[in-house]
Image: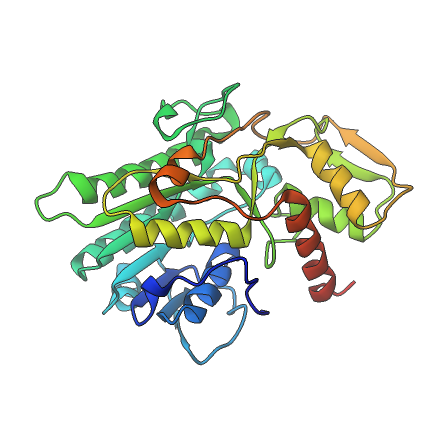
């Protein structure tokens, strides 16, 4: 993993602090580990089935199945701050075919790691939730817009995330000796070390592969008019670190760039960036798609922690294409 872009600042708060990144081999976790190490933190990261993305003697990697309480206890021992990045995630195809795949492991993992963190005296616990906890709307959703009603295809995933959020609230506000818990609801994250596997990837890595590999035609699931919010991974890490550093009480917070766009717009940017001028596009409305419109209000993050995304969609996509070309076998 290369040097951090200078536009993404170091967070001196973490220097010398003992941090656990649960899910250290995942997309968010691997990028977070790098940023924390470069900020001088004492980092431990859990690995399950995937190997570490990058090897650095400054990181203590621990093999752990976070569904097991004994593994969680070992992972959190001596830790001050915990980022819960571990989760069973996938793209639209997997959720459409097997909606139960995320239910049991995600609930059990979160309960086990929170219990272990509480017993170990962890100072702050941060959960990465999701924007699927919001209902379908025609306006940018604020943190207070949760109704416990979900887009129908996300009924299970939405409830899993909401239950995990409510568990955080219980630990933070409903017991005599609380643990500070923080909840982040991100926009759709993309960037270096994303999942580019056909079966499990999200929309941007899937489209990047199709553009770079010069698919003809390029098949796009749906009609391309779905409105989504995206955020470049390094901007998201900035937001995560700022939330952990600056917030002291339970308050779910959106982290987004605040610039909604359609899938068709994303594809057009990718075609332009990679000079695929004679591309043929086939929109397939029979393929599974998800929330048709998701806009996110990120004003609370700006007001509470001074967060604002620095990377435009075009710049972030350019960096992601370059990384994919450098790291794929194509």
Task: Determine which quarter of the picture holds residue 95.
Answer: top right
Give the left or right position of residue 309, taking residue 58 as reference: right
Q: Which residue of the protein is positioned furthest toward the right in this rendering?
A: 278
Query: Does 70 appear above or below 210?
Result: below
Q: Which residue of the protein is positioned furthest toward the top in this rendering?
A: 138
Q: Quadrant of the C terminus?
A: bottom right
Give the left or right position of residue 307, taking residue 77 as reference: right
Query: Does 54 appear above or below 231?
Result: below
Who's the residue at 74% across and 35% down the image?
A: 220
Give the left or right position of residue 207, taking residue 166 as reference: right
Query: Does 293 appear above or below 210?
Result: above
Image coords of residue 16 (percent x, y): 30, 72
Who's the residue at 65% across and 41% down the image?
A: 203
Image coords of residue 171 (percent x, y): 19, 44
Give the left or right position of residue 288, taking residue 37 as reference: right
The answer to whether one can see residue 67 in this image is no
Q: Quadrant of the N terminus?
A: bottom right
Q: Nearer the viewer, residue 186 or 303?
A: 303
The answer to whether one can see residue 4 in this image is yes
């Amino acid at each position: 993993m290369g040097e951090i872009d200078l536009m993404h600042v170091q967070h001196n708060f973490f220097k010398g602090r003992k941090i656990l990144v649960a899910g250290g081999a995942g997309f968010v976790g691997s990028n977070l580990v790098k940023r924390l190490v470069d900020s001088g933190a004492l980092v431990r990261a859990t690995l399950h089935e995937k190997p570490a993305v990058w090897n650095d003697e400054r990181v203590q990697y621990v093999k752990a199945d976070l569904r097991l309480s004994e593994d969680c206890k070992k992972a959190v021992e001596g830790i001050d701050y915990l980022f819960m990045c571990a989760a069973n995630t996938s793209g639209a195809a997997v959720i459409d075919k097997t909606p139960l795949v995320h239910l049991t492991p995600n609930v059990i993992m979160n309960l086990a790691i929170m219990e272990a963190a509480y017993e170990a005296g962890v100072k702050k616990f941060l959960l990465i939730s999701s924007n699927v906890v919001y209902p379908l709307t025609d306006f940018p959703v604020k943190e207070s817009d949760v109704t416990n009603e979900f887009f129908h295809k996300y009924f299970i995933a939405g409830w899993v995330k909401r239950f995990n959020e409510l568990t955080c609230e219980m630990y933070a506000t409903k017991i005599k000796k609380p643990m500070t818990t923080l909840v982040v609801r991100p926009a759709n994250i993309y960037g270096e070390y994303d999942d580019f596997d056909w079966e499990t990837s999200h929309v941007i890595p899937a489209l990047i592969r199709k553009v770079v590999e010069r698919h003809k035609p390029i098949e796009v699931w749906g009609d391309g008019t779905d409105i989504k919010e995206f955020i470049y991974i390094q901007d998201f890490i900035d937001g995560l670190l700022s939330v952990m550093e600056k917030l002291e009480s339970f308050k779910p917070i959106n982290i987004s760039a605040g610039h909604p766009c359609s899938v068709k717009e994303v594809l057009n940017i990718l075609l332009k960036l990679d000079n695929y001028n004679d591309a043929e596009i086939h929109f397939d409305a029979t393929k599974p798609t998800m929330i048709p419109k998701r806009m996110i209000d990120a004003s609370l993050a700006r007001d509470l922690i001074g967060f604002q995304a620095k990377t435009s969609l075009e710049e972030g996509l350019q960096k992601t294409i370059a990384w994919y070309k450098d790291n794929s076998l194509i």
